[in-house]
Amino acid sequence: MNNIDNISKYGVFGLSYDKSESSLILLSIPFELTTTFREGTLYAPHKIKDASSQIDLMNNLDSYAWQKGIYWDNSNEYFFLNISKSYRPSAKKIIDFLENNQLLNDELKNEQYIINNVCEKASNEISKLVFQILQNDKIPGVIGGEHSITYGVIDAIQNVYDDFCILQIDAHHDLRNTYLGFTYSHASVMYNILNKYDNVNKIVQIGVRDYCEAEKNLVAESDNIVTFYNFDINVQLFNGKSFHDIAKQIVDLLTDNIYISFDIDGLQPYLCPETGTPVPGGLSYEQIEYLFYLISKTNKKVIGFDLCEVSGLSEWDAIVGSRIMYLLSILALR
């Protein structure tokens, strides 16, 4: 099997499918407002797309799934770039004040209010764009950008799917009830989703290793969150359990419709050294590939995904990000 007519150095993964003939739409969302440690994910979509042309298409999940068509949609980039560049300096000023234990004056409180409104506007725009993709019977793959973009994606997904789970790969829970006064913070995205959308039947988190007490307590008290902490995974591995058994346990918990939210900092730091909040430990590329391989052998459907927090300031981070994006794409298309 081959489809050499659709090979091009200009399209994502070197493909040249147009939007109408593609089953998967990769939506570029260069949005960054609430990142709190290191910046740079704003520029990730462009860097990831450029790096994707170096990927050979054969893979271990389904070597011909790409023939269903993959299209890179950057038609709305300007909107997200513009609001990010316009409001990021104000957000950064607020973050610096609060992280230095300074109280916000009335002027900064007003700026914080404005930024929360801007984040809500961005989320609504993402929801509208993703809903259009779903209405056209295509699969959305959203490439960020900071992790807060997931909220808008889920807002659209839940209008189409009555029942689905989220597989979250992440170093963090992202379950804070606002963070530094930002309602739509990257650190609060799963808290917001959990508290608003009843048709998210379960959130399965893997790789988590950096969290606060309130998040840990929320997980313990919730019937809708299952967390495979990085430490617990390693304890099992160190005591002789195979990663196959751990991955199978994860896959068995997933329901028929799966949305995957992939924060690149869920990986080991050597794979994403310039991400915003890197944490020692994490999952290997091989473990992710094997987990996706097991999912691909089931009848479970990947209804969409996002890839977030990749640094756009590092070629290596973008190369790894593009490889993860390809695995996610093939898993969704297979």
Image: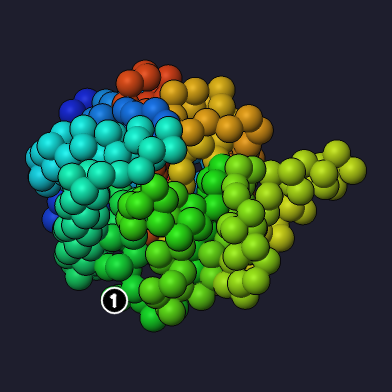
- Say which residue appears at 39% left-offset and 28% top-offset: 38
- Say which residue appears at 54% left-offset and 70% top-offset: 202
State whether residue 11 is above or below residue 119. above
State whether residue 297 is above or below residue 61. below
| Disc 1: CA contacts within 10 A as few (<14), some (14-19) or many (>=20) | few
For the question of whether residue 277 can be seen, the reply is yes
What is the x, y in percent for residue 233?
74, 46
- Say which residue appears at 44% left-offset and 38% top-offset: 101
Q: Quadrant of the N terminus?
A: top left
Number of numbered discs: 1
Left or right of 19, for residue 174: right
What is the x, y in percent for residue 245?
77, 53
Q: Quadrant of the C terminus?
A: bottom left
What colouring method underlies this structural image?
rainbow
For the question of whether residue 29 can be seen, the reply is no
Left or right of 9, for residue 44: right
What is the x, y in percent for residue 201?
51, 75
Locate residue 324: give its quadrant.
top left
Q: Amino acid at mark 1?
A: Asn
- Say which residue appears at 33% left-offset and 57% top-offset: 183
Label 1: which residue?
159
Q: Residue furthest top?
A: 315
- Identify the element where label 1 is drawn: loop
Frontmost residue, 114 versus 321: 114
Left or right of 19, for residue 167: right
Q: Residue furthest right?
A: 239
What is the x, y in percent for residue 108?
22, 44
Locate residue 31: give its quadrant.
top left
State whether residue 92 is above or below residue 163. above
Frontmost residue, 91 versus 250: 91
